[in-house]
Structure formats: C-alpha cells, structure tokens
C-alpha cells in the first residue's frame, strides 16, 4: 500500500520529469477532456512545441507536485479553491504574470474571481479556464419532486440515492440543512461544529443511500442504469446523461449549486514557462475554447466562445440554469488550512458507519 | 583454493542484483517514509520529532476499528481461499492425469493475465442490479426485484477471494505434487477412513504449502486497495483507503506514513502469531 501511495507518485513524477523535459516540450497535467487531441495537434503545429498530457484530479495533482516540490510538469490545472493553502504551505507554484495572459479573451468576472481566490500575499497563482457547478442529477420521471440537497436524505427515494463521499457533499448537505458553511470559513471551531451536524445527518440517512459514486463514469452509470434516481453530480455529466435519456437531467438545488473554477497554475519548477503561457492563450481563444466545451459540455470562461457553441450545448445551459439559479450559485472560496483535516475525518466517520 | 575463489566471485556477482533491488527499491523509499512518519510541524514551521502520528492511530477509534475490521476480513478471506482452493489443488494434482492437469492449471492463471482492475469490473457486471445473475433470476421468475449484491461486503469478499485464490492454489499444488500416492494407498489398505487420511496424511504433508499460501493471501488482501474501493459498499472502509486518504485528501503524509508502518508491523505480527499458534516454522515454508 505504501508503495501505491508514495512510489506511484514519486516514480510517475520522476519518470515524467526525466524523460520528457526539454525546451520544445510542454508537460501538462490536467483533467480528462480539458486538452482534446485535436487541439494538442493544432498547438503543436502552430508553435512547434510538443505537448505531453497527463490526466489527473485535484488530489493527485497536488500530491504529485508536492512530492517533487513543484517539478515534473510545466503547467497544472487545479481548482481555484485548492491553490492558496497549498501554495502557503508547500510553495509549489509560480506566481502568474498577467501581462503575459491575453485577458481580453476571458470573462472579466472570472479573472476577478480567480485573482481573489488564488491570491497569496498580493500575488496571483491562477488563470481561470473552465467552470461548472456541482448540483443534482435527477431522473425526472422517477423522482419528479426532487429539487434540493435535502432530497439526498429524503426517505421517498430510499435505496435510489447516491453521492460522492468527498467535500462537496458536506458543503451541499450543509446548505440543504439551511446553513452557510462558507460564512464559517473564518471560524474553525464553528465550522467543525457544523460539519459534525452534517456528519450526523449523513450517518442517520445512510440507509437510504444505494452507494457512493467515485467518478464521472460511475455517477453517469448509476443514474443511467436506473439504480439511482437522485444523486449529487456535475452539470456536464448530467447533460451527457440527458443526451441518452431525456428523463435524466442536471438541476440546480434550491439552496444553491456549488460553483467551481478550474484554472491554470504554473508549477514552481516548470521548465518551460513560455510554452505554458502560449498554451493558456491558445486554448482560451474563442474557437478553441468552444471546441473543448462542445466536446465535453464543460463551460468555458472564454468570452466570445458562445458564438461557436453547438445549439445543444446552449440549450443545456438555459434548461438547467435560470437567472435566479445563476445568482444563487455558491462559489467555493479558498479552503483555509486545517479545514481539509476536519472534512477528511468526517468523511471517514461517515464511510465507516454501519 | 582456486575453486573456492571462483565460488566467491560468482557469489558476489549473484548477490549484487539482489542487494541493489533490496536497497534501492525497498529500503531507501521506506527509510524516507519512516523518517516522515516521525516528523511533525513545529509552530515555527520547522520539522520536529514527534510520535503524534502513531498516537493518532490509537487515539481515534475509527482508525483502529477500521484496522481490526480489515484484518478480520483478511483472515476470513484467507480461510475461505483455503477451503475453496484445496479441493481444486487436490483434484489437479492427484485425481486427473498430468496431461489435463497442466492445461487446467494454465486456465487458472487467466485472471492474472488481465489484471486486477479488469477482473474487478468483470465482477461488477456479474453482480450488479442489472447484472448477469440478477437478470437471470428475474427472467426465470425466482425473484421479483434485484438482490443487492454489488457494493456490499459480499461483493467485496468475492472480489478479494477471486483475486487472491490463485496464490493459494499454486503453493498447495506444489507440495501435493511431491506427496507419494503410496502413502495414501497404504493408509487406505490399513483401514483408515477418508477423513483420517485427509487430516492425518494429506493436510500435515501439505502444511508448508498451505502456510505459504496463507501468508501470501493474507498480505495481498490486507494491502489491497482496488477491490474494496470499487466493489466494497458504502460501509466497507479498508485500512489502505485510509492511508490513501491521508496522502491524497488531507496531505498529512506523516500520518499516512505512520499508518503504512503500522499496517506493515501489525500484519507481520499477525502472521508471526498465526505461525506460532499452528506450530509452523517459516524456514520450512520457504523450502
């Protein structure tokens, strides 16, 4: 097991670091769907820089960069709320030089949000790229009334409920219970008390849960097979499922969907910072950003991309987000240090409960 | 003289890769882990020696309960693996002819070729609510709604058993192969019952194989991550998952490392204890 945790992290980064370094290469660690093959090819042709893509998620990205103290990759794509506390503690990123970023092609509000959330000591550590929300995926035929986080412990759907046992469910459940967890980010003791209440609620209602999903694929699979009719989920996944079965759709919970922004951050030991900025400016060009969105359904921060979006993608957005829903999105703020431990302990407790 | 010298050179040449393997791939990474398991952050931001990571295991009920749960399952699955595989090993070595036996033994290896993840997904297809078994039972009208099999401790046990079974069959087969059939015949001629032959001759003879198979299966299961994570239900928290969480969710590498060493030490002690209790010797197992 120790081998799994440490050596996979260490060896993977070592290999990546030693084999693919070089001036003509951009080593990108990102999420599935964020760097489509066609765009990688286009970028390589335009700039002559080879792109080596590694797929990952927030936790792994941070663990890998931490193991190498910011080496092994030239560009990473963590979520905006996971940057500042990691940067404060482990110093694994370079500050962003916004004069090198073509901000004209990015929605101003998103740049502002990224600057605020990923700022440490007056420096900014991220450029926004893709945003979306965690809300609920509902089978409207089998669960017509489900419209809030609290339906994740509604006995009416007993045995047909699922969510991921990670931090979004703690936050969502807190909102569903009528609290505002983000307002407690300045008060650790109060936050812990709130998480304890949420933990109790989720343990009590555990009997209604079919299983905890673990990935985009499993959340899609569960709702598509009909094993689950109400689950927490990502907007893009709900829309992908909607394409296959129009009864299934993504909805914003009444008490607010949770908004996330995935960003670009430059690791401290990046060997090709120039290429990193080139990639950022390249993929945020309206046409390219629209291509990413059309392929994956994830929403882009690129300003004029909507001109190039498929009608189906636009329809998804207007179907799931009313004006009120958008105003009610709860955007993740930077997670204060120490809070991750509170949440992890709570999650362990819920998982172990019978 | 010359002979002895030659022997020495060969000896060192042969031992070199073994030592390199041990030191570079096993000792060094573990040393690093061992150090970080004793390291804590001081208030000033430096590194200080601490036992808090190890204490955390004993202080939080959830950690040691999870460990006990994991260990209990590992022991249970080891016993199950023995019960399931012993007849198979006996059949392959003693009942059918050598010609078919090697072919069948080869078939047994197939799950190893495709890898753990694929076999685990295979079980998901078989056990799911709309999986092979449930669909079959529904279609013949034996049940009217699917039985909950996937994402339970049952599916996790099946998965772990399936993955580890092979490591029980092979050592048992290799000891049974050297068992002289005439011993069984002689006992039979002298009027021993089948049960007596089994408990007095076959089992004692194959004990080294059973023990080494048991150790491998126990260690594999207690250190497995994939099957509990994917097949396990909403309540099956495996100790390795907790170590994974320490490293990847809370970034508490010190505690993760400490838990890793605790896993290593406690599971080794369980094996030592089991060897003592059954009167087995590790040296015999190796032969």
Image (tube, coloured by chain):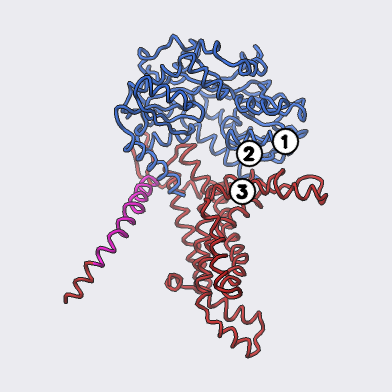
Chain colours: A blue, B red
Q: Residue at x 43, y 33 (%)?
A: A54
Mark 3 or mark 2: which is in front?
A: 3
Residue A265, given in percent of the width and then of the height, sits at 41, 24
- Residue B242 sits above or below residue B275 on the image: above
Mark 2 or mark 1: which is in front?
A: 1
Subunit that carries the residue with mark 2: A
Mark 1 and mark 3 residues within 8 Å of each other at the beta carbon: no
Assign a secondary structure to mark 3. Answer: helix
Q: Residue at x 46, y 53 (%)?
A: B262
Label 2 and label 1: CA atoms lie apart by 15 Å
Residue A343 picture quarter: top right
Label 3 and label 2: CA atoms lie apart by 19 Å
Q: Residue furthest left?
A: B1
Assign a secondary structure to mark 1. Answer: loop
The residue identified by callout 1 is A226
Subunit that carries the residue with mark 3: B
Mark 3 and mark 2 residues within 8 Å of each other at the beta carbon: no
Residue A10, given in percent of the width and then of the height, sits at 38, 42
Give the overall secondary structure of the magenta segment.
Answer: helix
The N terminus of chain B sits in image quarter: bottom left
- Residue interval drawn in magenta: B10-37
Report the side of A249 relative to A167 (left or right): right
Label 1 and label 3: CA atoms lie apart by 20 Å
Residue A238, given in percent of the width and then of the height, sits at 64, 27
Q: Determine if the magenta segment contains residue B98.
A: no
Q: Residue at x 63, y 34 (%)?
A: A219
- Share a chain, discs 1 and 3? no
The residue identified by callout 2 is A212
């Amino acid at each position: 097991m120790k081998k799994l945790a440490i050596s996979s992290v260490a060896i993977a980064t070592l290999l990546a670091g030693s084999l693919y370094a070089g001036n003509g290469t951009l080593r990108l660690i990102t999420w599935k769907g964020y760097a489509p093959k066609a765009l990688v090819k286009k970028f390589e042709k335009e700039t002559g820089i080879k792109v080596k893509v590694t797929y990952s998620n927030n936790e792994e990205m941070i663990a890998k960069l931490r193991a190498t103290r910011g080496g092994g990759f030239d560009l990473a794509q963590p979520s905006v709320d996971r940057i500042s506390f990691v940067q404060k503690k482990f110093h694994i990123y370079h500050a962003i030089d916004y004069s090198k970023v073509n901000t004209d092609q990015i929605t101003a509000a998103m740049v502002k949000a990224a600057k605020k959330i990923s700022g440490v000591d007056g420096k900014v550590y991220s450029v926004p790229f893709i945003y979306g929300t965690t809300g609920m995926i509902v089978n409207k035929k089998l669960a017509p009334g489900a419209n809030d986080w609290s339906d994740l412990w509604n006995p009416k759907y007993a045995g047909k409920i699922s969510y991921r046992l990670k931090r979004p469910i703690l936050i969502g459940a807190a909102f569903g219970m009528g609290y505002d967890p983000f307002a407690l980010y300045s008060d650790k003791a109060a936050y812990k008390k709130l998480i304890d209440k949420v933990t109790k609620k989720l343990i009590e209602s555990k009997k209604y849960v079919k299983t905890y999903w673990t990935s985009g694929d499993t959340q899609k699979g569960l709702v598509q097979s009909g094993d689950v009719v109400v689950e927490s989920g990502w907007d893009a996944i709900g829309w992908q499922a909607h394409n296959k079965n129009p009864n299934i759709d993504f909805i914003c919970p009444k008490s607010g969907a949770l908004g996330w922004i995935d960003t670009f951050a430059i690791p401290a030991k990046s060997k090709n910072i120039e290429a990193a900025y080139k990639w950022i400016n390249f993929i945020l060009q309206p046409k390219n950003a629209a291509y990413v969105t059309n392929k994956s359904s994830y929403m882009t921060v690129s300003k004029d991309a909507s001109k190039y979006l498929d009608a189906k993608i636009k329809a998804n957005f207007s179907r799931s987000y009313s004006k009120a829903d958008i105003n009610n999105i709860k955007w993740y703020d930077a997670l204060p240090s120490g809070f991750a431990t509170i949440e992890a302990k709570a999650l362990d407790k819920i998982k172990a409960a019978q | 003289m010359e002979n002895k010298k030659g022997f020495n050179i060969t000896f060192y040449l042969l031992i070199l890769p073994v030592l390199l393997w041990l030191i570079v791939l096993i000792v060094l990474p573990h040393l690093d882990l061992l150090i970080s398991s004793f390291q804590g952050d001081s208030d000033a931001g430096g590194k200080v020696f601490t036992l808090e990571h190890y204490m955390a295991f004993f202080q939080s009920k959830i950690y040691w309960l999870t460990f006990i749960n994991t260990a209990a399952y590992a022991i249970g699955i080891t016993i199950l693996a023995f019960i399931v595989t012993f007849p198979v090993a006996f059949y392959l070595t003693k009942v059918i002819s050598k010609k078919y036996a090697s072919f069948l033994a080869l078939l047994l290896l197939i799950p190893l070729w495709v890898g753990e993840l694929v076999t685990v997904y295979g079980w998901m297809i078989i056990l799911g609510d709309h999986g092979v078994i449930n669909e079959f039972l529904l279609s013949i009208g034996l049940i009217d709604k699917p039985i909950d099999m996937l994402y339970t401790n049952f599916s996790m046990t099946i998965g772990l058993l399936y993955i580890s079974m092979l490591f029980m069959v092979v050592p048992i087969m290799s000891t049974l192969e050297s068992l002289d059939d005439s011993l069984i015949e002689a006992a039979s001629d002298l009027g021993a019952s089948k049960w007596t032959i089994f408990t007095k001759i076959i089992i004692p003879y194959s004990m080294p194989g059973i023990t080494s198979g048991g150790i491998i299966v126990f260690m594999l299961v207690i250190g497995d991550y994939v099957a509990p994570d994917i097949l396990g239900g909403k309540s099956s928290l495996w100790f390795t998952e907790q170590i994974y969480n320490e490293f990847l969710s809370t970034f508490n590498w010190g505690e993760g490392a400490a838990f890793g060493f605790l896993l290593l030490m406690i599971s080794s002690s369980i094996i030592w204890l089991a060897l003592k209790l059954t009167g087995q010797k590790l040296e015999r197992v190796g032969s």
